[in-house]
Amino acid sequence: MRNIAKILTLFCLIVTDGSPALSFQGEESESPAPGMAVQALSETPALRERIAGTLVYTEPVGGIRAIDLTTLNPKIIRASSAGHSAIHTLSEPDAEGGIMFVSGVVSSSRTYTVHLAKGGKEQVLFSGPGDPLWDNAISPISLAPKGGKAAFVAQPLENAGKQFRQLTTGPLRIWDFSTASLRDLGISAVGERPSWFPNGRMLAYVADAAASTPQDTRPSETLVRLLDTATGESTLLAPGRMPLVSSDGRTVLIARGRNFELVLTDVKNKTERVIRRSHGLGTPIALVDSRYLIYKGKPTPGAPTGETNNNSPLVGPKPIMAIKLLDLENGQFTTLIPLIDPRRSVTALAHAVAPNAP
C-alpha cells in the first residue's frame, strides 16, 4: 500500500515536460482598486532595459525555447517533436549559449540521459541508472556561466536499482567538459540544484545540518555551504536551502523555513536581508547583480489569466503563471512573459547593463 501511495503522489506531479511545479507560501495578495488599470499603473516596463541576457524554458514535448531579455524576441533551441522524450529539467544557459537538459524514457531500462544543446547542435554527454522523474535519479543540473563545468546531486549508491526513491541526500558531482568526464567531489549534498558563482570555480550547495560538523549546527534542517571546486574547501554560508548565486557573486538568495522566506545573504560579511514576497513573487529564477530578481509568479492583477491544459486527472487545471522582473532596491517590477505554464522548467543567465541605476 505504501508503494501505491507513493505512486499516486508522484503521479500528481507528472507534467508534460516532466518537471514538478513548486508552490510557495507567504505571498501577499494584491487586489486592484475598482475601475483601475492596475497593470499599466503598477508595472515599470522600462525596468527591463536595465538587464541583458537569455531566459530559456521547456515546451512539450521535448522542446526548448529561448527569450532574449533585451528584445524579448523568442528563438527555438530545440523543436518540440512527438519523437522526443520529455525534458525533466533544464540547466541555466552558459555565456556561450550552451544549455544542458535531462531526459528519460519510460521503459524497463529506467535510465536518465544528460544532453547539451549548443550552436544548433545536440549531443549526449552521459547517462545514469534510474528514471529522472519516478526514481528522482538526478537533481536539476547547474551549468557554470564559464569554465566548462556542471554540477548536480545523484542518488546514493545504496539506492542504485531501487525504484520510487526520493532524492534526499546524495553525492555532489561535477561534469567537466575539458575531460568529458564525471568527478565525485566526496561531498554529501541535499538533492537540490547547486548554484555556480560567476567564476565557474565556487559553488553553492545544500547540506544536511545533521551531517555537518558541530560548529555548523544551526536551528535549521539544511545549510547552504560554499565549495571551492579546485581545492575542495567547503565553508558555511547560512541556514536555508535552494541557493541562487547572484551574477556578480556578491550575494546568494536563500529560501528558509516552512514558508520559504527569501533571504539575501552577503557572501563576504554574512549580513542578511529578508526579501518581502510582493508582486506575485513565487519561484526565483535568476538573481542579477544582487539587485534584480527574475522570478515565476502570479500575473499582475488586471493582466490576462488562464488555466493549464492537458492536466493530470488527479490534480486538474492549474493557474497560468507569469515571468517577471523585480528591482529589490525600490520595488519596481515588470512582466517579461505574461502567460506561461507553471509546469515549464525555466532558467536564465543575465547581467545588469545599468547596475548603478537609481
Image (tube, grey):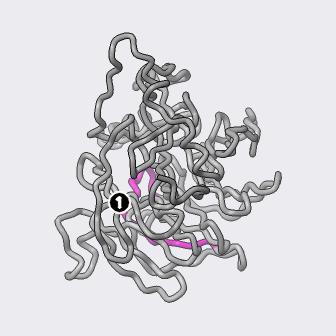
What residue is shown at x 24% (from left), y 62% (from top)?
221
What residue is shown at x 64% (from left), y 36% (from top)?
59
Can you say whether 243 is above or below 9 in the image? below
What residue is shown at x 47% (from left), y 64% (from top)?
245
The image quarter containing residue 113 is bottom right
Q: Between 128 and 2, which is closer to the camera in this rendering?
A: 128
Whether 166 is among the magenta residues is: yes
Whether 45 is among the magenta residues is: no
Can you say whether 143 is above or below 294 in the image? below
Whether residue 118 is visible here, answered yes or no, is yes
Name the image quarter holding the N terminus: top left
Q: Residue furthest right?
A: 120
Q: Residue furthest front?
A: 358
Whether residue 154 is visible here, answered yes or no, is no
Q: Between 300 and 199, which is closer to the camera in this rendering?
A: 300
Task: Tell me which segment is drawn in magenta.
Answer: 162-175
Residue 65 x %, y %: 69, 41
55 with respect to 163 (left or right): right
Q: Residue furthest bottom?
A: 231
Q: Amino acid at mark 1?
A: Leu
Q: Between 145 and 129, which is closer to the camera in this rendering?
A: 145
Residue 317 x %, y %: 45, 21
User: In the rendered image, which residue does mark 1 sit on?
Assistant: 264
Secondary structure at badge 1 equals strand
